[in-house]
Amino acid sequence: MGSTPVAGELLAIGELAPGRIALEFRAPGLIAGLRPGHALHLVRPESGGYRLRRVAPVSRIDLLRGSVEVALQPRADGGQDALAGLRIGEVIELIGPIGQPILINKGTMRLLLITDGEGFAWVRALADASTRAGISVTMLQQADTAADLPPASLLPEGVEIVVATLDGSIGHRGTVSELLAEYASWADQAVVAGGADIRAAATSAALRRGTADRTTASGAPVRTRAATRGDRAPWLQALLSHEIGCGTGACGGCTIATRAGQVRLCREGPAIDPIGSASKGGA
């Protein structure tokens, strides 16, 4: 687990969705070890000797530019994040990687991502990496209204985006839970990130999902792919965001209870197996 601070120069400030700020830092010495599912600690000295420290999921890795984009998570108290006031060219400390990468099995050719505005930042890098690896990616996105959705331009062109809005302003009227049965039968693996409701819907779909013959989202039959030797990931991984902490597992502030026991999200997480044991990271 990386713990030595690296200087990160702010290159750009963007928006993943309304109110969801993304910061791109130049940090060529850090990005080679980053993978989808990782987070970084952002550390900025403040007045009085206080050091602001925030956990931010890695939402994009650009090896050619030597940069990493991270997303500021909404503060629990709803207040303004001081890091949102950074200016282009400012330098802060980046510490990471925090957590373990998401595991994608060697035999996976069809990946289902299930997310909402809260979880999009955690799976954007995975959509990029998976499409580059030749994996078919479908993303189910849920939002209250069309205005809350991330721009489609933030994802590779090869990603199929299926939208559900509660007000019916675009896509399916309702929630992604009403679409999951169709797409769960298509996918070799699935990853969910977002609020408790969307994680619960994905977990229910995983429990209902059969292990015999399945059909694609278009209705064509497809046989369940046999597990490849060495595959370690469960069919569903759930990404759980976590608040400020030490990043080394020592403080226990991000520890949660799972069916497999206690899991430290900054060490064994943030991806867990919501059905069985917590998923362990790897290269």
Image (tube, grey):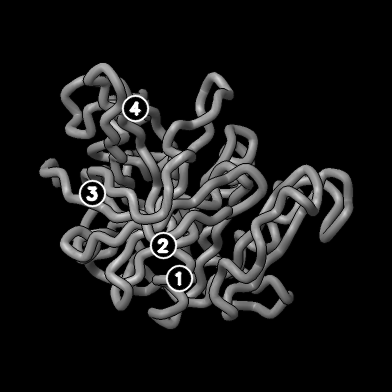
Q: Which mark is residue 264?
A: none
Tell me the residue that label 1 is attached to.
Answer: 128
Q: Which residue shows up at 43% across the image and 63% down it?
A: 126
Circle 3 crowding by C-alpha within 10 Å: few under 14, some 14–19, many from 20: many
- Tell me the amino acid under the disc marked 4: Ile
Q: In the image as oriented, which residue stretches furthest toward the bottom?
A: 134
For the residues bearing labels 3 and 4, Cβ distance under 8 angstroms: no
Q: Which residue is mark 2?
A: 60
Tell me the SS state at disc 1. Answer: helix
- Asked if disc 2 and disc 1 are in contact, CB closer than 8 Å, the reply is yes
> Can residue 6 be seen at all in this image of the molecule?
yes
Discs 4/1, front: 4
Name the N-terminal-most of marks 1 and 3.
Answer: 3
Placement of 95 over or under 196, stated as above or below: below
Q: Earlier in the sequence, mark 2 or mark 3?
A: 2
User: Type of residue at label 2?
Assistant: Arg
